[in-house]
Image (cartoon, helix red, strand yellow):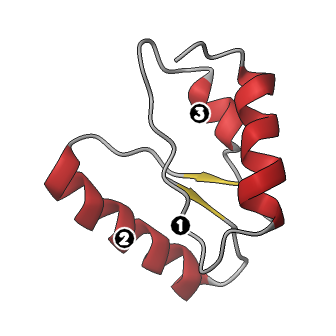
């Protein structure tokens, strides 16, 4: 799951709770952030063997979804 990132403890806890809820439905979930804190999507993807699905956790599909996430996928070298 890819989120923006925040310095707010409550914001980080909200993302962790969302990731936990998603993991109860689909299995293992790793969290990455495109700004403010890490790990980044490319860092997470570089540690995964096999296929991966990136789930954007943003309120709108703007710059981070259309630019940053594809850039991190490319940087990671992850093939799937």
Q: Is residue 34 above or below residue 75?
A: below
Q: Is residue 26 left or right of residue 44?
A: left
Q: Are marks 1 and 3 in contact (CB under 8 Å)?
A: no
Q: Position of residue 18 (x, y in %)?
A: 36, 70
Residue placed under numbered mark 3 in the picture: 44
Q: Are marks 1 and 2 in contact (CB under 8 Å)?
A: yes
Q: Residue at x 48, y 20 (%)?
A: 48
Q: Which dot, 1 or 2, sits closer to the camera? A: 1
Of pointers 2 and 3, the one earlier in the residue sequence: 2
Q: Nearer the viewer, residue 16 or 70?
A: 70
Q: Which dot, 1 or 3, sits closer to the camera? A: 1
Where disc 2 sits, the SS reads: helix
Q: Residue at x 59, y 12 (%)?
A: 79
Q: Residues within 10 Å of mark 3 (few under 14, many from 20)?
A: some
Q: Exactly how many numbered labels are in the figure? A: 3
Q: Residues within 10 Å of mark 1 (few under 14, many from 20)?
A: some
- The answer to which quarter of the image holds residue 39 is top right
Residue placed under numbered mark 1 in the picture: 57
Q: Position of residue 36 (x, y in %)?
A: 80, 65
Q: Nearer the viewer, residue 11 or 26?
A: 26
Q: Is residue 71 left or right of residue 29?
A: right
Q: Position of residue 19 (x, y in %)?
A: 37, 61
Residue placed under numbered mark 2 in the picture: 18
Q: CA distance from mark 1 to mark 2?
A: 9 Å
Q: Residues within 10 Å of mark 2 (few under 14, many from 20)?
A: some
Q: CA distance from mark 2 to mark 3?
A: 18 Å
Q: Is residue 41 left or right of residue 51?
A: right
Q: Is residue 20 above or below residue 32?
A: below
Where disc 1 sits, the SS reads: loop
Q: Is residue 67 above or below residue 10?
A: above
Q: Residue at x 60, y 72 (%)?
A: 58
């Amino acid at each position: 799951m890819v989120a923006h990132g925040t310095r707010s403890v409550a914001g980080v806890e909200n993302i962790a709770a969302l990731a936990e809820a998603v993991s109860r439905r689909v299995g293992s979930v790793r969290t990455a952030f495109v700004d403010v804190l890490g790990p980044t999507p490319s860092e997470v993807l570089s540690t995964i063997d096999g296929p991966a699905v990136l789930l954007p956790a943003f309120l709108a599909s703007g710059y981070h979804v259309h630019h940053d996430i594809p850039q991190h996928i490319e940087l990671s070298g992850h093939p799937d």
